[in-house]
Image (cartoon, helix red, strand yellow):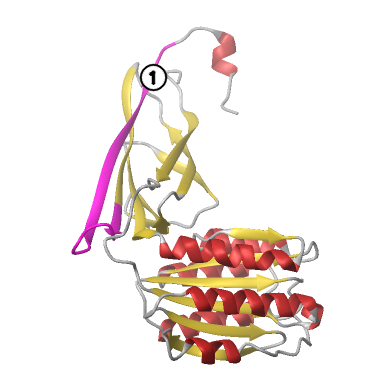
């Protein structure tokens, strides 16, 4: 960075949970499966979605909690929060045998009801799996509204993973709700691919090694954040607090933000101190985990006019 003038640059934080990590005791799961039952899901799509949900429930561990919500113009609870066990698995499967697909698409109705069911359930890790194959034509319809819904989920410790089927679904909405809640977004062109996505989400849940992960970024003197890309955050004074949700073994998540550096003399300038806080599920008993790091940049004086005009791409 050139000394003697203010400048902007970017800070990138990369978080990675090693593949070899294992939880000391498997974290219990509180899962809500939220399925589109609008007219466009009629036939094979609905059959495949229900089959994928039954398969996922069948492989949940004893003691996990599951609920199932379907939505069209309004939402309906097919399965209230139920603890999975030897006696309940077969009954849960029977409740997902037949659903008539009809009506319009209120995705926000499904999300709101899914959150309500998760509030009633129990588990160390709360996850919603949201499926849609169409456009939101009733209820909330804009990405900003879905971001606010997802922020409510994040505050409650819920991650939403969204799944779009075929090419007619609203990618902006499903991507917004996944990003704002620290979830994943999937696309399957054919409904036969639903089982693969459900299995991937289940593996992620069962390999969880940390929950409640958040980064606290304490800015150096005079440093200002001008933009945070694609992640929700809160402020604690001058510090930026960014939640990342739960981490499974092998997960990698990142944060990118833009900062404004003030004028300075040649030398080192502290940009940020970063502390990571999380619930460590790899220890027995489980406890609070933390790690930290510091970032500084070197401001160098230059008289090269070309360098003075250059900017970060």
Note whether residue 143 is visible. Answer: no
Above or below for 280 versus 250: below
Q: Position of residue 235 (x, y in %)?
A: 37, 56
Above or below residue 270? Residue 180 is: below
Does residue 89 appear in the picture of this structure?
A: yes
Quarter of the image for residue 288 reads bottom left
In the image, the segment drawn in magenta is: 277-301
Picture layout, residue 170 above or below residue 258: below
Q: Nearer the viewer, residue 308 or 106?
A: 106
| Image quadrant in which the N terminus is located | top left
Left-right relation of 100 to 158: right
* In the image: residue 128, left or right of residue 284: right
Q: Secondary structure at mark 1?
A: strand
Q: Is residue 68 magenta?
A: no
Question: Extreme top residue here?
Answer: 303
Measuring from the top left, give residue 126's x and y in whole percent.
Answer: 43, 72
| Picture residue at 48% right of the left edge, 42% below the top | 257
Q: Majority secondary structure of the magenta segment?
A: strand
Instruction: Please name the residue shown 29% across and 38% down the image.
Output: 293
Residue occupying the point 60% across, 28% down: 313
Q: Position of residue 297 (x, y in %)?
A: 37, 25
Please give left or right for residue 187 compared with residue 292 in the image: right
Does residue 38 sit above or below 311 in this rendering?
Answer: below
Task: Tally the marks.
Answer: 1
Task: Name the residue: 61% across, 59% down.
Answer: 185
Q: Where does label 1 land, which residue? A: 299
Q: Residues within 10 Å of mark 1 (few under 14, many from 20)?
A: some
Q: Nearer the viewer, residue 262 or 140?
A: 140
Q: Nearer the viewer, residue 228 or 238?
A: 228
Left or right position of 185 against 276: right
Residue 181 in the image, given as x and y percentages of width and height: 50, 63
Q: Quadrant of residue 211?
A: bottom left
């Amino acid at each position: 960075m050139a000394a003697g003038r203010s400048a902007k640059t970017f800070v990138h934080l990369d978080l990675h949970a090693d593949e070899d990590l294992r939880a000391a005791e498997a974290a219990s799961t509180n899962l809500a499966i939220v399925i589109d039952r609008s007219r466009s899901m009629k036939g094979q799509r609905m059959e495949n979605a229900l089959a994928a949900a039954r398969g996922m429930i069948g492989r949940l561990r004893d003691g996990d909690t599951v609920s199932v919500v379907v939505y069209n113009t309004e939402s309906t609870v097919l399965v209230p929060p139920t603890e999975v066990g030897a006696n309940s698995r077969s009954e849960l499967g029977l409740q997902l045998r037949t659903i008539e697909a009809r009506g319009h698409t209120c995705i926000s109705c499904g999300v709101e009801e899914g959150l309500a069911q998760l509030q009633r359930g129990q588990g160390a890790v709360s996850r919603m799996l949201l499926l849609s194959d169409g456009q939101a034509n009733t209820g909330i319809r804009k990405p900003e509204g879905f971001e606010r819904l997802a922020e409510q989920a994040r505050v409650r410790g819920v991650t939403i993973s969204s799944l779009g089927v075929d090419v007619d679904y609203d990618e902006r909405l499903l991507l917004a709700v996944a990003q704002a809640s620290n979830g994943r977004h999937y696309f399957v062109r054919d409904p036969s691919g639903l089982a693969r996505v459900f299995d991937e989400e289940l593996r992620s849940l069962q390999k969880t090694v940390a929950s409640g992960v958040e980064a606290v970024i304490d800015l150096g003197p005079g440093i200002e954040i001008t933009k945070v890309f694609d992640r929700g955050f809160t402020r604690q004074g001058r510090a930026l607090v960014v939640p990342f949700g739960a981490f499974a073994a092998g997960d990698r998540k990142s944060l990118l933000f833009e900062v404004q550096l003030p004028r300075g003399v040649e030398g080192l300038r502290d940009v940020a101190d970063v502390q990571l806080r999380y619930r460590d599920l790899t220890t027995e008993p489980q406890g609070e985990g933390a790690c930290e790091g510091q970032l500084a940049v070197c401001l160098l004086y230059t008289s090269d006019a070309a360098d003075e005009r250059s900017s970060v791409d």
